[in-house]
Amino acid sequence: MKPRTTMLAEDAGAQALEQLVRDIRACTACASVLPLGPRPVLHVSSTARILIASQAPGTRVHETGQSFNDASGDRLRGWLGIDRATFYDSARIAIMPMGMCYPGRMPKGGDRPPRRECAPLWRDRVLALMPDIRLTLLVGSYAQNHVLGPGKVEDRVRHYRDFLPQYFPLPHPSWRTGAWERRSPWFAAEVLPALRGAVHALL
């Protein structure tokens, strides 16, 4: 049994995180430039051991309030080798994008980048209240560049071992990645078994 002081500290941390999440969900810092208005989406807890650091919500995620609730989520769950129930168990897996609101569409198609205001406002404050995170999956270029600095996604994914045990770089699991996977058999042969092993070891 944990000492009483440890349990009290954990309870206080969990309560502080819950309040911070309420503050985030009430955020209107970018309201004037968000085409669908603010709806911050994140799934976090003080006990999660894995963090999925992603890009920003798409329209379906904005509508449902559930991260990766679309085809990209199906692809990502397939990469991880886990089902939806495990994926959305925030006591074990946290999900926090670089931008927590849907940023809108580019004039020529595709979603806009995450709003730059978001991560500096909230990210470090949330991470400080998630002390059990052991592995962060850096999904896509925006998460990787924020944490690791500028670089190429494919190079980082190929050399994933260089970032372990703290980080595991991954491509963004959009529909475009399907063609890339077919051209890059090393991803399924080498990277995915290591990814699944790292994730399952922490679950």
Image: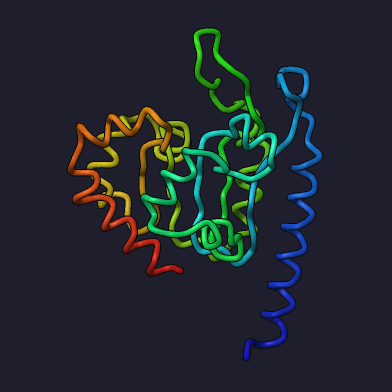
Residue at the outermost top position: 107
How far across and how far down the image is residue 54, in percent? Answer: 51, 40
Q: Quick check: 41 above or below 142?
A: below
Residue at the outermost bottom position: 1
How has the structure been colored for display? rainbow
The quadrant of the picture occupied by the N terminus is bottom right
Residue 156 left/right relative to 109:
left
How far across and how far down the image is residue 130, in percent? Answer: 60, 60
Residue sitting at x 71%, y 73%: 9
Q: Quick check: 56 above or below 49?
A: above
Residue 22 left/right relative to 176:
right
How far across and how far down the image is residue 38, in percent? Answer: 75, 30
Residue 168 left/right relative to 31:
left
Residue sitting at x 63%, y 24%: 103
Q: Quick check: 45 above or below 143?
A: below
Quarter of the rendering containing residue 58: top right
Quarter of the rendering containing residue 197: bottom left
Residue sitting at x 59%, y 44%: 67
Q: Quick check: 196 above or below 7?
A: above
How far across and how far down the image is residue 136, in percent? Answer: 45, 52
Residue 146 left/right relative to 177:
right
Residue sitting at x 43%, y 58%: 135
Q: How many marks?
A: 0
